[in-house]
């Protein structure tokens, strides 16, 4: 049913005069909300009708999203407020055009996937937290064995064709570095015997990396040995880039030949024990 311009003009005039929807309804005897909505379409409510406690930021954002064509469902998911509140906030705005069913399906699929990712992240975090608690307190024996295995995985090794009886350790993980340094302290290696050097790609911020590693190990960056710069290979696509890329820290124990020999012996002992005491029967 079409409405005369004069009735809309009356409704808008009353609205701009500061009347509420209820007052306009009673003044013009319009008791159908749909008709009243159409008459007042585009006219914001007067300030005095807004509740002072106000979710003003939410309301403004809801109106902004509605103007962009968002549905009540999307606004509800985005803002976390009820549909009834959204309806009150945006009822004077025009309804968005109906979306193509394919587009709606894609949107619903994306929302479901985002929810699934959030659930997976929460499960991942809970598993990691539980595993962290399982470790409990670490004894000196625990740290000793862990340190031997850590060095044999990441440290330099002596070869019959290349004698390298030096205790040199390289890693880019700050947690690994901290465990390794705690292990050296457990062995009684004095801090004065430790020599540090950064190994990093040519395109990185070398000075920032030096400052980062120096802060981590608790020494002055000026005491670091000359940085080893890795040249760029144009045929490779590097993924270790960005502000969090700090290269690797190289830690060498001076006069470390004796320490290296002991590490190699400790590792051999661990392998023998694993083979004889803990390996599955198939491997014995």
Image (cartoon, grey):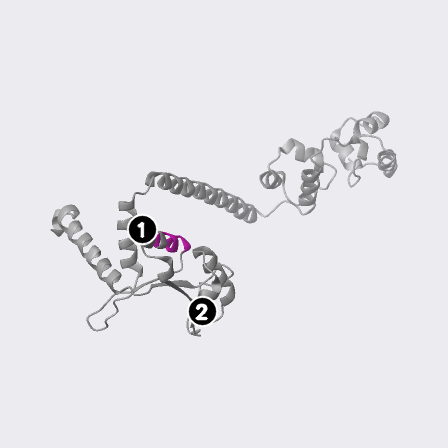
Q: Position of residue 7 (x, y in %)?
A: 86, 34
Residue 177 colored magenta? yes
Q: Is residue 205 visible?
A: no
Q: Position of residue 22 (x, y in %)?
A: 80, 26
Q: Residue under circle 1? A: 186
Q: Residue under circle 2? A: 201
Residue 176 colored magenta? yes
Magenta segment, prevailing SS (helix, strand or loop): helix
Q: Which picture quadrant has residue 136?
A: top left
Alpha-carbon neighbours of circle 1 within 10 Å: few (<14), some, or many (≥20)?
A: some
Question: Which of the image's four quarters has the N terminus?
Answer: top right
Q: Is residue 223 above or below residue 99?
A: below
Residue in front for this viewpoint, 191 or 166? 191
Q: Is residue 80 above or below residue 184?
A: above
Alpha-carbon neighbours of circle 2 within 10 Å: few (<14), some, or many (≥20)?
A: many
Relative to 61, 19 lies left or right: right
Relative to 136, 273 lies left or right: left
Residue in front for this viewpoint, 88 or 99? 88
Residue in front for this viewpoint, 150 or 192? 192
In what element is the residue under mark 2? Answer: strand
Question: Where does the magenta region start and end?
Answer: 174-180
């Amino acid at each position: 049913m079409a409405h005369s311009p004069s009735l809309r003009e009356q409704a808008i005039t009353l609205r701009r005069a500061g009347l509420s929807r209820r007052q306009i309804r009673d003044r013009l005897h319009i008791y159908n909300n749909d008709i009243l909505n159409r008459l007042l379409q585009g006219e914001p409510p007067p300030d005095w009708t807004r509740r002072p406690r106000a979710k003003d930021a939410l309301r403004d954002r809801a109106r902004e999203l509605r103007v962009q064509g968002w549905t009540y469902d999307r606004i509800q998911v985005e803002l976390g407020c009820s549909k009834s509140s959204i309806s009150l906030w945006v009822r004077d705005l025009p309804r968005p055009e109906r979306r193509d069913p394919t587009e709606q399906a894609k949107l619903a699929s994306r929302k479901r996937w985002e929810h699934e990712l959030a659930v997976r992240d929460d499960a991942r975090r809970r598993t990691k937290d539980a595993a962290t608690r399982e470790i409990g307190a670490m004894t000196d024996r625990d740290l000793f064995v862990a340190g031997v295995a850590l060095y044999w995985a990441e440290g330099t090794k002596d070869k019959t064709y290349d004698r390298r009886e030096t205790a040199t350790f390289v890693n880019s993980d700050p947690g690994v570095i901290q465990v390794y340094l705690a292990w050296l302290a457990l062995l009684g290696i004095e801090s004065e015997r430790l020599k540090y050097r950064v190994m990093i790609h040519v395109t990185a911020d070398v000075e920032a990396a030096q400052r980062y590693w120096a802060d981590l190990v608790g020494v002055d960056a000026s005491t670091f040995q000359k940085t080893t710069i890795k040249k760029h290979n144009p045929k490779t696509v590097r993924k270790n880039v960005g502000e969090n890329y700090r290269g690797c820290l190289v830690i060498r124990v001076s006069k470390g030949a004796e320490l290296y020999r002991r590490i190699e012996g400790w590792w051999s002992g661990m392998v023998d024990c694993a083979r004889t005491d803990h390996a599955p029967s198939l491997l014995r």
